[in-house]
Amino acid sequence: MQPDAVQQASPATQISAWFRSIPLCTRSVLVLCSGIYACCLLTGYDDFYPFCLSAQDVVQKLQVYRIFTSPLLHVGILHIAFNMLAFVPIASSLERTQGSLPLAHLLALLTLVGDSFFIILSYALSYWDEQRWLNTCAVGFSGIVFGLIVIDNAASGASHRSVFGFFAVPAKVYPWALLLLWQILLPGVSFLGHLGGILAGEAHVRGLLKYITPSTAFVQRMEGTWPVSACAHWDAFILSTTTELSGPVLPTSYRPSETGSTDTPRAAMAGVWSWVEQMRSRISTGYSAVPSSDPGERTTSHSPAGRGAFAGQPHTIAGQEAASQKFRLVIWQQSVFEIRDVSGKRTSRNLLRATLMQFVETQSRMQAGPRLCHFCIARVVPRASWPRQIATKASGSDALCDWVVSQGGGLRSLKIESGEGNRGFELVAAEDIAEGTTVISLPEAATLAYDDGKTDHKLQALINQIPADLWGARLALRVISERIKATNSKWNTYIENLPRGIPGLPIFFQREAVQGLQYAPVTHQINKRCRFLLDYTTKELQGNADAFQGQNVDANALAWGMGVVTSRGFRLKGLSASASMLPLIDMSSHSFEPNCKVQQLSNGDVRMITLREVSRGLPLTLSYGNLDNDALLLDYGFFVRGNPHDRVGLQFTLALIKAGRAEVAKISDADQSSLDSLPSWQRGRLEELGVESGSEVTLGRKPVATEALVAAIRILAATDESQLQGRGAADLGSLEKPLNGDVEVLALRILAGVCLCAHNRFSSTLAEDDMAIEAALQGREPLAADVLLAVQFRAEKKRVLYDALASIASRIKEVAPTLTSETPKHSV
Ligand SMILES: C[S@@+](CC[C@H](N)C(=O)[O-])C[C@H]1O[C@@H](n2cnc3c(N)ncnc32)[C@H](O)[C@@H]1O
């Protein structure tokens, strides 16, 4: 699967890769602050007074420059380290979603407004104690970091946030709780500096600064002018992508989760807490930030631990292919804290190693393409808020039924009800329905397609440029264009009823959930889709606002459109034909044994017809196809437990088969010999099979393995060509047609070994997953909804492997009854 990047790249390469992954504006601030700090250090300069933020000097001596010089100065290595560790991840994320220019503007705004609040508050408080408040002089970037925390927090949409894992607070008060806690932990830090930052952030979030914020059009004009346009050629420069939409607002920012405190595992935060306490005792002895009692003496008030606190949630990097089975790395945003073993016990505080692992992660992200990974998009698009977003549609359901009727459609014997678990709304039989009943009829005019001849020509031209196999993107553009038209669209009632977020779709997963999947085929697809969304919107859709009523369609908008389309679109004329949206019919849930089907009549009208008698109260279901869980998760945001079509994908290589053999033979290492070292007859037979190294093979319930894999294993298990009994490439892969005795048993055992290898690629065991799922469902160890789904998904993959192993074991018994004690004994 993924290469072991730890062994491939030197720390220097990894540090440089990490540095290059930081977008331009954030990088410039990092370089500027670090450069100034390094210069001061090298020259021994430590008189910050002329540049710090002092209310009195700004107001009475008009030294306004202090507003902009004070954030750039830091008084110690810890001061700058913590400020930058807090700043870089939040700012990078904002820059990737909003663009370099908007972030530069935001930082300037937070500096100006935050420091203005600082000055106003200093004067207000000087009424009680002039010396204490007017003599305070602050330096450091933490005020701005606090402002960014407020903005990041509002964008996160979480209803609750955990404060150091000890208690959860409503998200609204999270920055305030951090402010208070930070003040208690580090009494010397600049309270007013942080407060000013928070107030500036709040003002921004509440839209109070919009009058001094340039419009998107202005920013984009600026991006076209020199020297900004010169910077735009750099990879690190992010073009602005903000969408301003009238009518229903597309999900341009992360809005959402209804779940309670979805933050980190408490245990991880407890580690952070103890670390914070340690830092506190170390730092607080180092500096005194209490204003001097001598009015003539100025004291620099600063926050060594960051004039800001750290925002965000810790991420558990599980499933790093390299070292995943030994430990997991717990990080909090990008700040490295400690390493834990798989059971969660802290094993060491090996900062360097942890940092390296972080770089590895950054690098693999970069290999997938900077700016285009799921981390970026996870920040851009809304995380589906599970029950609530669906529930908002309840009142609109009647309107949808009325709309279908108003379009000349008809419905019979059905109602819309909330389905089980997270499946949202579904169609339910309102009475007993006989087989062959048409429960919904939909005239062609009520369906929404991109090739109906009614699409605006500019939009149609844009759609035609998209390759036909990307039907999802084609249809998504049409749906988005109708959404932008709002009440001017004929489909407005339908569009209004679409969910604003699609629960469970992995493109909306947070990073820890994507990593929690531990399954390369799906994470690869997520990256690919997110890359497409960002690429297509930044390269192809830029400058095409005309096709969308003058609105920019950014990655958020397209992600929403694609999500809606992949989870609800129909391809009635076959997989190679165009797709369409079928209002109301697309409220049906999936079943592999559906009780309804959809039929298109020759005049284009569509009907949903029962396939058998359906009792009152039962859901009316359709089959979305015989899909494996990967496809269900990626396109629909759910998967089916015990799915007969589910499979585990692997890349075929000779090494895989050798590793399988080593696994069952209990040899510590597979021999690394290449294809060339095989006898010529074996090489020839493998070539005949035509299965290329790196192509996908699968293990599953039925069939247990791809025929090519079985055939290759049999070829390698044989010691003599005659043992293959003259079987050709075409029929060597059928498990139903075994080879003779020992060769077949050996082949089956190697296949079992391959299953074990596939299992070993997960960094957790099924028992661990099941425990985590149970603890989450019982509320003992809450997991974010997407993380829980990821854990359930990977547990299901392991069940597939167990079932495959069971089938192989019973097959071994069948072909070699006398060898039953030799069947694989591995406990997986
Ligand atoms: C075609 S829509 C069905 C209507 C949707 N439930 C709603 O509320 O709008 C498909 C979505 O329904 C949910 N769904 C459908 N069948 C499901 C099933 N068998 N299990 C879980 N969720 C299902 C998934 O969220 C999927 O993306």
Image: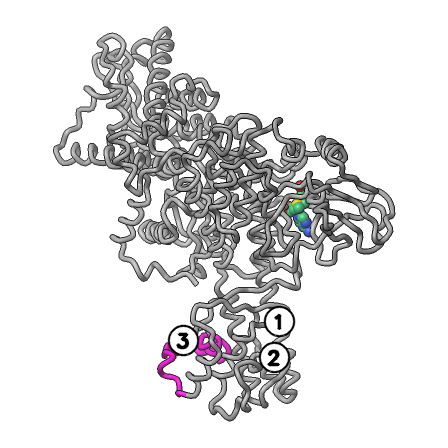
The answer to which of marks 2 and 1 sits earlier in the sequence is: 1
Q: Is residue 582 left or right of residue 184?
A: right
**Quadrant of the image for the C terminus?**
bottom right
Query: How far is the residue under mark 2 from the one under mark 1?
Result: 9 Å
**Quadrant of the image for the N terminus?**
bottom left
- Location of residue 767 (image quadrant): bottom right
Q: Residues within 10 Å of mark 3 (few under 14, many from 20)?
A: few
User: In the figure, 515 relative to 386: above or below?
Assistant: below
Which residue has dot 1 on it?
A: 703
What is the residue that sits farthest to the bottom in this orientation? 722
- The secondary structure type at the circle numbered 3 is loop
Query: How far is the residue under mark 3 from the one under mark 1?
Result: 29 Å
On residue 667, the disc is: none
Residue 774 image offset from top left, x and y in percent: 63, 51
The answer to which of marks 3 and 1 sits earlier in the sequence is: 3
- Give the number of the mark in front: 3 or 1: 1
Q: Amino acid at mark 3?
A: Asp
User: In the figure, 603 relative to 133: above or below?
Assistant: below
Q: Is mark 2 within 8 Å of ligand 1?
A: no
Q: Is mark 1 within 8 Å of ligand 1?
A: no
The answer to which of marks 3 and 2 sits earlier in the sequence is: 3
Q: Amino acid at mark 2?
A: Leu
Label 3–label 1 contact, CB within 8 A: no
Residue 175 image offset from top left, x and y in percent: 46, 28
Residue at image x 47%, y 42%?
378
On residue 735, the disc is: 2
Residue 365 image offset from top left, x and y in percent: 38, 50
Q: Amino acid at mark 1?
A: Pro
Which residue has dot 3 on it?
A: 669
Q: Which stretch did the figure color magenta?
A: 657-680
Please name whichever residue, 481 or 605, is drawn nearer the observer in this view of the structure. 605
Residue at image x 57%, y 63%?
798
